Image (spheres, grey):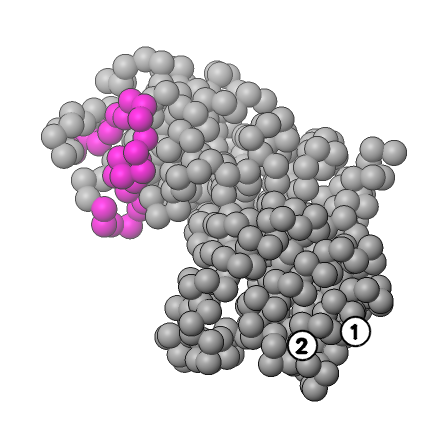
Amino acid sequence: MDLERLFYPRSIAVIGASTTLSGGKLPYYHILKISGYRGKLYPVNPARDEIDGQRVYHSVDELPGDIDLAIVSAPAKAVLDVMKKAADKGIKFVHFFTSGFGEIGNKDLEQGLLKIARESSTRIVGPNCIGVYCSESRVSFDPTVNQNIPGSVAFFGQSGGVTSNFTRVAKARNVGVNKAVSYGNQIDLRVHDYIDYFADDNDIGVIAGYIEDVKDGHSFIQSLKKAASKKPVFILKGGMTNKGADAARSHTGAVSGEYSIFSAAVRQSGGILVDTFEDLVNAVMLATGRKKPEGPRVGFIAAGGGASVTFADIASLGGLRIPELQEDTRTTIAGLVSDVNTSTKNPVDLGAFGFNFGIVSRAMEALDKDRNIDVIIPYFSIDFIAVFQKKQMKTGPDMICNTAMHMSKPVAVVLSMLAEDNIDIAKARIEISKVFRSAGIPVYHTIQDVVFSIKKYLEYRHILSRLKA
């Protein structure tokens, strides 16, 4: 399926274009203008003659030919007429933001739209979805998520809210989203069509998605196998439980099926399942890091025995290994600290010296030379640094980044923050996170998050070796 003109449309018609940014529907015309869409833009509204000085077309019939994408916010009762006229005009793709279809039991309306699509060359996105995002073409459903760099992540989501949330969190964490699509009820274009397109897109290195149901199981499995043989595909399944499946049915009309069957099929096909939205974002962040884990042997650096013990427990339960360090590694680290309240074993407890970015960076260098270590995880307490080590906040994170850049092994940082009611500490974590993320270093809030992400990425590496065997 060639979706090039969906993500790179040369012209867009907004049918049901609103005159303001307010109201009960997404103001796509204004969003596209704000986002900097550079193609031809045609607003359609039978009740208006102009919007912001631009001519408004009263009907699809009045539009010029050769339109790549129509975004429809018209009421459900009008969509069949809109679809028929769009097909007659030869519009390549029609995205229906409009709801009121299978999710409320109105299957006949969906079948009416689909019949028109099958009798023409016009394809349907949705209905009941927020549509497409492409960083390069500046097509967007939310101007706040636009990024200056194309990025390497593609996202497909059956839920508009989850899709929007992913793009927003990705921007906040400096995870570059290249393309995204919210596909809703998927009556025509289905999830496997988007996976196929993303798999063949050389600008995309990681695929992530949220699925409530699959319409064509065989095609989905084949598409997932193809994509997973080229790049990681992380999937969050909506409707894992009976209650979740009921919610999915009223959300997009999805019939979720047995999660055990779905999960087995995804794993067999190379997809990586996650349990929560936060896990999805965290796994993608690690997969887009400059350097990625090649094995499960982790070296942990912290200030304090409690954090070290906690890490040892969580990492071991998560299937990671905490090997003994080589003797020369321990000797090097011992030369950085005193022998009071410190430990050069793995996990490494630097005691109070662990609040010194310079000493932590030198300990990282020592672990990088250790042949028993695959991944290095420095742990920082923002609460302590923001209060007692303010002088380091401008130079310390850069020191860690410079060290990591010259190392051969990947680094994933944990920035712990406990004082949730302290704005200054929150600001410190935001600023330090920005520095690390700009350097391509994954940053996590908790030990659990980093352990889970490493585990999932290594799961993908294992699956990839099986798929290529």
Residue at mark 1: 345
Q: Percent x, y for residue 383?
A: 49, 78
Decide which of 162, 433 is in the foreground and name it: 433
Mark closer to the chain start, 2 or 1: 2
Q: Secondary structure at mark 1?
A: loop
Can you see residue 234?
no
Residue range of the region highlighted in magenta in the rendering: 21-48
Tell me what residue is drawn at x 20 percent, y 24 percent.
57
Left or right for 329, reference 141? right
Decide which of 310, 411 is in the foreground and name it: 411
Residue at mark 2: 337
Estimate how packed mark 1 is, as few (under 14), some (14 to 19) or many (20 or more) residues with alpha carbons within 10 Å. Answer: many
Residue type for callout 1: Lys
Decide which of 216, 54 is in the foreground and name it: 54
In this view, which residue lies farthest toward the top? 65
Tell me what residue is drawn at x 37 percent, y 75 percent.
423
* Quarter of the rendering occupied by the C terminus: top right
Residue type for callout 2: Val
Tell me what residue is drawn at x 49 percent, y 41 percent.
177
Left or right for 217, reference 28? right
Q: Percent x, y for residue 58?
A: 20, 25
Residue 40 lies in the magenta stretch: yes
Q: Percent x, y for residue 43?
A: 24, 29
Tell me what residue is drawn at x 66 percent, y 50 percent.
407
Above or below, 148 against 409 in this view is above
* The label number, if any, that marks residue 422 in the structure image: none
